[in-house]
Image (cartoon, rainbow, N blue to C red):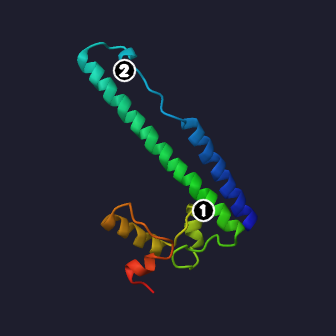
């Protein structure tokens, strides 16, 4: 079973890493070189280029985060901690792991983390396991 999980994590890691490399950096494009020279077209071209660049950066950022989660999942697998929630130390359901093999939290703890983010923003400084203190769960 661990061999199957390891192979899946490694395959997903290679795929995500290749996609990150494929996206690379976002090349600057000269809006004046895109064809239509009318003033309105220039603004539209710049807007489209900017939007496209922002989407590429956001996509790349999400992929890098996934690469990091997959790498961490491989570390947890090697350490015998794969499939154990980093917040409550309970087993993560096999169905959840099948869908997202890099997941670190059970559904209950993930829900609690997302609630904290909505209330306090994304800059919550905490260590794994502190969720129980925030939610009052035991």
109 relative to 11, above or below: below
136 relative to 49, above or below: below
| Residue farthest right in this picture | 3
Counting the numbered discs, the total is 2
| Residue farthest bottom in this picture | 138
The residue lying at 38 percent from left, 17 percent from top is: 34
As helix, strand or loop, the secondary structure at mark 1 comes to loop
Residue 133 x/y as whole percent: 42, 81
16 relative to 70, above or below: above
The residue lying at 47 percent from left, 44 percent from top is: 59
Question: Taking 62 as reference, is 118 left or right?
Answer: left
The residue lying at 31 percent from left, 30 percent from top is: 47
137 relative to 33, above or below: below
Give 33 or 94, whichever is nearer the viewer.
Answer: 33
Front label number (1 vs 2): 2
Residue 120 x/y as whole percent: 32, 66
Q: Which residue is mark 1?
A: 101
The residue lying at 67 percent from left, 63 percent from top is: 75
Residue 10 x/y as whole percent: 69, 54
Give 10 or 28, whichever is nearer the viewer.
Answer: 28
- Of the residues under marks 1 and 2, which one precedes in the sequence? 2
Residue 58 x/y as whole percent: 44, 44
Q: Which residue is mark 2?
A: 31
Question: Taking 76 as reference, is 125 left or right?
Answer: left
Identify the image quadrant of the N terminus: bottom right
The label shown at residue 77 is none
Question: Taking 14 as reference, is 127 left or right?
Answer: left
Q: Residues within 10 Å of mark 1 (few under 14, many from 20)?
A: many
Identify the image quadrant of the C terminus: bottom left
């Amino acid at each position: 079973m661990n061999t199957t999980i390891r192979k899946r994590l490694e395959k997903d890691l290679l795929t995500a890493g290749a996609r990150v490399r494929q996206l690379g950096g976002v090349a600057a494009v000269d809006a004046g070189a895109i064809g239509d020279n009318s003033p309105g077209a220039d603004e539209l071209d710049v807007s489209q280029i900017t939007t496209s660049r922002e989407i590429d950066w956001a996509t790349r950022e999400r992929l890098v985060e996934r690469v990091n989660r997959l790498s961490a999942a491989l570390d947890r697998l090697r350490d015998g901690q794969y499939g154990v929630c980093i917040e409550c130390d309970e087993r993560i359901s096999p169905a959840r792991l099948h869908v997202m093999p890099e997941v670190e939290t059970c559904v209950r703890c993930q829900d609690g983390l997302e609630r904290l983010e909505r209330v306090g923003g994304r800059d919550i400084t905490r260590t794994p396991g502190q969720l129980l203190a925030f939610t009052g769960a035991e």
